[in-house]
Amino acid sequence: MTDSANSVRAARTPLNPPVRLLMGPGPSNPDPRVLAAMGANPVGHLDPYFVQLMDETMDALRQVYRTRNHHTLPISGTGSAGLEAIMLNLLEPGDSAVVCVNGYFGQRLAELARRSGADVRTIEAAPGEVVDPDALDRMLKERPAKVVAFVHAETTTGAMQPVQDVVAVARRCDALVVMDCVTSLGGVQIEVDEWGIDAAGSCTQKCIGAPPGMGPITVGPRAMAAVRGRKSKPGTWYLDLALLFQYWGETGATRKRAFHHTAPVANIYGVHEALRLILDEGLEVRWARHEAAHLALVLGLDGLGLSLFTPAANRCPTINVVRVPDGVDEARVRSRLLDMGVEMGGGLGALAGKVWRVGVMGTNARVPTVEHFVGALDEALRAEARVHSGTTSSARDTTSR
Ligand SMILES: Cc1ncc(COP(=O)(O)O)c(C=O)c1O
C-alpha cells in the first residue's frame, strides 16, 4: 500500500486516545467539567452571549491574578504566545531589557525579548538556584533597563524565584517588571498588584486545569502606558495588544467590539469553566491543596530512596525535579510508567538524562493521586531493577511485586 493510502486510512480511524494520568511538567489532566464545556454549542465570536463570556473570563482571570488590571485576557495561543505578546508590545528597538536566567525558560524569555529588537542583557544563576537581587541591582546601576523579566517557577529546575526583592530592585530604576508564571498561576500564591508586577503571562494546561491552547496575560497601567507611547508599531499584528483590546473591549465608554481574529470559542469556554472552578474552590484553598500534594510527593519519593534536585529553600510545589539514581535508565522507567497509564517528564537541557520532572498541578494536585503516582513509580523502578539483576528477560515486563 502507498504512503498516501495509509494516511487516508489513518484519518478514518475513530479517535480513541489512551487515558493517562498526566504527572509531567504539563499538561495536567483537565477537570471533566472543563472538557464537557469545550464540547458545548459553538456560537459566533461576536455573539452577545460570547461577548458576555469574554467579559466574565477577563474578570475571573483578574481574580486569579489578583489584579485590577483591565488589560487581562487569554491570548489565542499557548503560554509562549502570551509571553511573546508582552515582550513584543513592551519593548522596541533601542530599548534595554534585563532577563533573569536560571534555566531553559529564562533563556526562552530572553530570546522573546530579543525578537523585539531591544538590547537584552541576562543575569544568570546556576540550575536549581534563584537569581540574586543584589547582582540584579549592580547590573541595573551600571545601566538601567526599561524591562526586567524573570521566571517565577523555572520548570526545568523546579526553582521558584522570590518575587518581592526582584520587584523592589527593578522599580528602583523605574523598570517595568515582567513575570513568566506559566507553571505557578493557580497553584501557588501570586499577587500581581500587591507585588507590583507590571505584566505577567501564564498558560491554561498546568495549574489552571484546562487543555493547552491559551496564554492568559495581565498588563498593568504602567506597562500599557509604555505600549501606548511606542515610537513604532509592534512587529506583530496577531499579538498587537492595541488591536486585541479593540476586540476584547477597552476601558471607558466605548465597549464596541471590532473583529480582530476568529476567537477559539471552544478554548475560551474551557478557560471560562476552569476559572469558575478555581474561584469556586477558593484560591487560598487551592494553593494549600497544591502544597499538601507536593509534601506528600516528597515524602513518598523519600520512601523510595529518591531525592529532589532543587534545594529545599527554592522549591516550587507544582514542579518537582527528582534525581535519577545512578545506574537507572531514566527513559526506560518513564516508558514503564507510561505503560501503566502514568506520564512523568524527563529532564530538559543540561539536566536531560539526570532528572525526572513530576508535576503536581490542577486536578492532579491531590494526596491520593500523588500516592497512586508514587506506587506506580515504585513498581516501575522494581521492574527495572529486576531486569538489571537478570531476574526477568524483558525491559517491558511490568509484573507487580
Ligand atoms: C516556565 C515556562 N514558561 C513558558 C512555557 C511555554 O508555555 P507553552 O508551552 O504553553 O507555550 C513553559 C512550558 O512548559 C514553561 O514551563
Image (cartoon, rainbow, N blue to C red):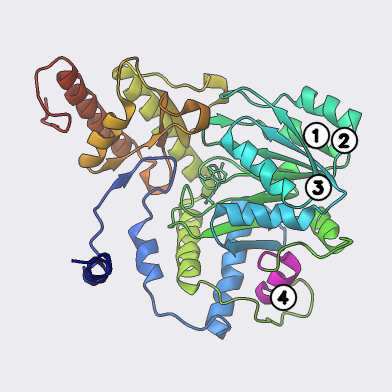
Rounded to the nearest whole Å, what is the CA distance between mark 1 and mark 2?
6 Å
Q: Earlier in the sequence, mark 2 or mark 3?
A: 3
Q: Which residues are magenta?
A: 238-249
Identify the residue position indicated by label 3 in the image: 118
N-terminal-most mark, 4 or 3: 3
Task: Tally the numbered discs.
Answer: 4
Q: Position of residue 305 (x, y in %)?
A: 32, 16
Q: CA distance from mark 1 to mark 4?
A: 33 Å
Classify mark 2: helix, strand or loop: helix
Q: Within 8 Å of ligand 1, the CB of disc 2?
A: no
CB atoms of marks 1 and 2 within 8 Å: yes
Dot placed on the residue nearer the N-terminal end, 3 or 1:
3
Residue 287 falls inside the magenta stretch: no
Residue occupying the far front of the picture: 2
Binning the other alpha carbons within 10 Å of mark 3 as few (below 14), some (14 to 19) or many (20 upward) gives: many
Q: Secondary structure at mark 4?
A: helix
Residue at figure coordinates x 23%, y 34% from the top left: 336
Q: Is residue 46 above or below residue 19?
A: below
Residue at the image point whose x is 72% and y is 24% from the top: 132
Residue at which label 1 appears: 168
- Which residue in the protein does label 4 denote? 246
Q: Which amino acid does the dot numbered 2 rest on?
A: Arg
Q: Report the side of 237 relative to 360 (left or right).
A: right
Viewport quadrant of the N terminus: bottom left
